[in-house]
Amino acid sequence: MKIGQFIELLNAECVTYQIDEEKEYNYAFASDLMSDVLALANNTTVLITGLNNPQVIRTAEMLDISLIILVRGKKPSEETLAIANETNITILTTDLIMFETCGKLYESGLSALSK
């Protein structure tokens, strides 16, 4: 799935620079615990979270995750946006709750990331 498909499916807004519109994402992982993300995610993973702070960006950066979806209409701070733009991480925001976001992505063929 590509960034444009995420935007359309989730009625999402891109709040950072879109870095790579052609990159394919194969997996999604939803968590508000960054320790779980560190243990399980990889660079073809989309991170879905309700957390909205610079630590989310730093966690994604460590794992080469280039797409984060913020749920529940969360808008990142200027500091978070600056770090995301510096590290080439795209942030999308959606008004959907995490459960609905995950359901729509799974239903559209995105695989769940598991142990």
Image (cartoon, rainbow, N blue to C red):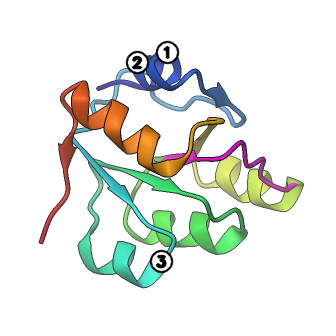
Q: Which residue is mark 1?
A: 8
Q: Which residue is mark 2?
A: 5
The kind of residue on which mark 1 rests is Glu
The kind of residue on which mark 3 rests is Met
Using residue 110 as the reference point, say whether residue 53 is left or right of it.
Answer: right
Inter-mark Cα distance, 2 to 3: 25 Å
For residue 67, above or below residue 10 = below
> What number is the disc on residue 34?
3
Inter-mark Cα distance, 1 to 2: 5 Å
Circle 2 — which element? Answer: helix
For residue 40, above or below residue 77 = below
Q: Is residue 89 visible?
A: no
Q: Tell me the residue at 69%/37% (across/down).
A: 16
Using residue 95 as the reference point, say whether residue 46 is left or right of it.
Answer: left
- The magenta span reads 68-77
Q: Residue furthest right?
A: 78
Question: Looking at the image, which is closer to me, 1 or 17?
Answer: 1
